[in-house]
Structure formats: structure tokens, C-alpha cells
Amino acid sequence: MTARGILSRATVFYAGHFVSFMRVTAIVWIPVSIAQALALQLALDRNVAALTVGLVAIVLGPIGTVALIVVAAGQLEHAPVGAVAALRRGLALWLPTTLAGFYVVLWFLWWLFVGVIVFAIVSALVAFVAWAVIGSPADNWASFETVLIGVAALVGVLGAAPFIVVFGMASVAVALEDHKAFEAARRAIQRACDRQFRRSTFLLGLSYIALDWIVIGFSSVVAGVVAAFTQSPFALAFASALPGAAIGGALSIVALVYTRDIRAQREGADLAAAVDDPEIAGRELIDRFLARRDSLAPQARAELAARIGRRVRPNLQASFDHLDDEALFEHLARTL
């Protein structure tokens, strides 16, 4: 599925369950709103207020994120999960979710550091060439610095795009697959940076950044309208936090839909489930595997072939020990 397809499916799904999803994420945005309101009410220093709100978000954010992912996954799999049960799961997975996010942040900072070094070297070379060609008039160098700052900002935005998607996918991996934080984070990085999906990861990240900027502008307008009618800091804080909560929930839904798509296309998650279904015949499993094996990741391909082989071989009249699993499937497809 393309990035446009992922966004379309995630948008339709999110809009169809918006109210129920917002009830789950309320555990995050309501306390954040209260913290913002108290900061306004107490006239705290701007840095102190930002730190307070940030700490509340860091503490409660992973809980709400995991709970939302669990509820959304239940809806997609037609096995609804209640909000209370989802929040309990979010609380139980708070530490691995936080650690997975920390791992992704370190991964991003490492590549940011590498990018800064490369950018500095390239900029120095360009500056040296420019100095050799045009000399060093002050106005020329001022223009060069402006261009350099603009390019650096653009590169920073482009670099943040995949990080945002990986961050959301790490939470999905912790919530639904592996409670080991670092393993879940590595799996999310591997999936998002897979050669077949890099373009989609990048486009999804850019789309989220663009939407986030739009929401920030919208939040400012809403806050201005609310401030015109009331001086209540609580009303102002709630009005400012609600759009942010909505966009944060959207990222989790996009990450969930994207992860499921990658698992189906590159990891054969649907084939793995079919192997465990006794209603599906071995010949059908073989045909489905052979039709899709070239699109599967090498490790997933080998694991699926082994699982299907363990199911098929006991039912054969001959042992075929001289054939590996895929060669056996090809032979059976030709002869049966």
C-alpha cells in the first residue's frame, strides 16, 4: 500500500471511531490541560510552566498511546477492547514504551550528529570555493549565511520525517508484539527503513509534520477565540490542548495501519496466521507462499517456509529429505 493509501485508510478509520479514541486519549490531554491552566493561573515562569507540562506529558503519554493502539487494533481485528482494559495495559507497558521511545530518540540523535558533521564539511567546502571565486564581500557572505541557515532548517525537517514515523511504530511494536523495549524499537527502525518502504516512511512523516503545523495554527486561532469570550485559564488550556491530542492520536493510528501493512507485505503476517489455521489446506498454503515469496523479507521468507514445511511434510508419502522447503514446494506445485 502506498503512503497515500495508508493515510487514506488511517483517516477513514480514525474519523469513524474518533469519539471512542478521544475518550482513551483523554487520560493524557485532560491532565496536560489542567497543568497548562494551573501554570497560567499561578503565573509561573514560562520555562517552569513548559517543564511542568512536559513532565505530565512524558509520564502519561505512553499510557495513552498504548491504550489507543490496543483499542484501535481491537477494532481492526473485530475483537473490541474496553477503554479500562486498554488503559491498564498502557500502565503495565509504560516503562518499555518509554524506553523504546528513548532508544528511537538516541537513534535519531546519532544520525542527526552524522548529518551535522556531513553538512558542516560540505558547507566548508562550498564556502571555500565561494571565497576563491567571489572573494569575501560582506554582503555576499551575509546572503550565503542566510541560504545556509535555510538549507539547514530544511534538512532538519526532512530528517525529522522518518523519526516521527519510527517513534509511533515503536509504540505499536511494544503494545502488540514485543514488550522488550529495545527489541521493539529495533524492529520499528528496521521496518520503517526497509528498502521497500523508505519512500512511504518519508512521505508519511512529511505529511504528519505538515498536518501538525496546520493544527498548531488552528490551535492558536481556537485559543484566540476562546480568550475573546472567557478569561478562564482552564477553558483556554482545554481549547489549546484538544487539537494537539487529536493529531497525536492520528499519529498512533497511522503507525498502526502502516505497521500492519508492512507485516502483511514483508513479513507475511497473514500467511503465518494461515499456517496455524487447520481449515486451510497445505496446498493452498504452498500456492500462497510461492506467489508472494519474492516480496517477503529474507528472514520472514525462511521462517514461513520452515513452518509450512513442518506442516506439509508429515502428510507426504515420501520424505523428500534431499529437498529444502522451497524446492519441495516447487516440486509439489508442479506435480500435484
Image (cartoon, helix red, strand yellow):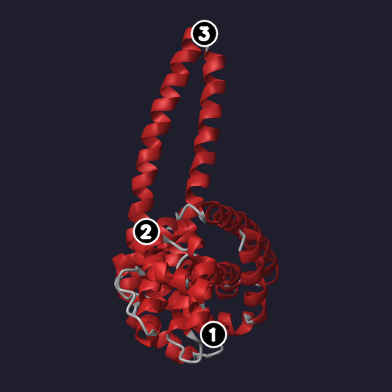
Q: Amino acid at mark 3?
A: Val
Residue at image coords 50%, 86%? 281
Q: Earlier in the sequence, mark 2 or mark 3?
A: 2
Could you give the CA–CA distance between mark 2 and mark 3, rounded to whole angstroms?
43 Å
Q: Quadrant of residue 308?
A: bottom left
Identify which residue is drawn at 32% across, 60% down.
Answer: 103
Residue 286, above or below 278: above
Query: What percent of the width, then of the height, locates residue 263?
Result: 48, 69
Q: What type is the residue that disc 1 sits on?
A: Glu
Q: Are there few (<14), some (14-19), or many (20+) residues within 10 Å of tag 3?
A: few
- The correct choice, above or below, for 294 with respect to 272 in the image is above
x then y, percent, for residue 36: 49, 69
Residue 332 in view, yes or no: yes
Distance from the alpha carbon under mark 3 to that under mark 1 = 64 Å
Q: How far across and how far down the image is residue 291, in percent?
A: 54, 68
Residue holding disc 2: 104
Residue picked out by circle 3 = 133
Q: Residue at left 35%, top 41%?
A: 113
Q: Is residue 11 left or right of residue 297?
A: right
Q: Could you tell me how far apart the alpha carbons at marks 1 and 2 are, in whole angstroms?
A: 28 Å
Q: In this rendering, is residue 172 above or below 138?
A: below
Is label 3 in contact with label 1 (beta carbons under 8 Å)?
no
Label annotation for residue 77: 1
- In the rendered image, the quadrant that contains the N terminus is bottom right
**Residue 318 at x, y percent in the picture:** 35, 81
User: Badge 2: few (under 14), some or many (20 or more) residues near its Cα, within 10 Å?
Assistant: many
**Label 1 packing within 10 angstroms: few (<14), some (14-19), many (20+):** few
Closer-to-camera residue (330/6): 330
- Determine whether 77 is above or below 294 in the image: below
Q: Amino acid at mark 2?
A: Val
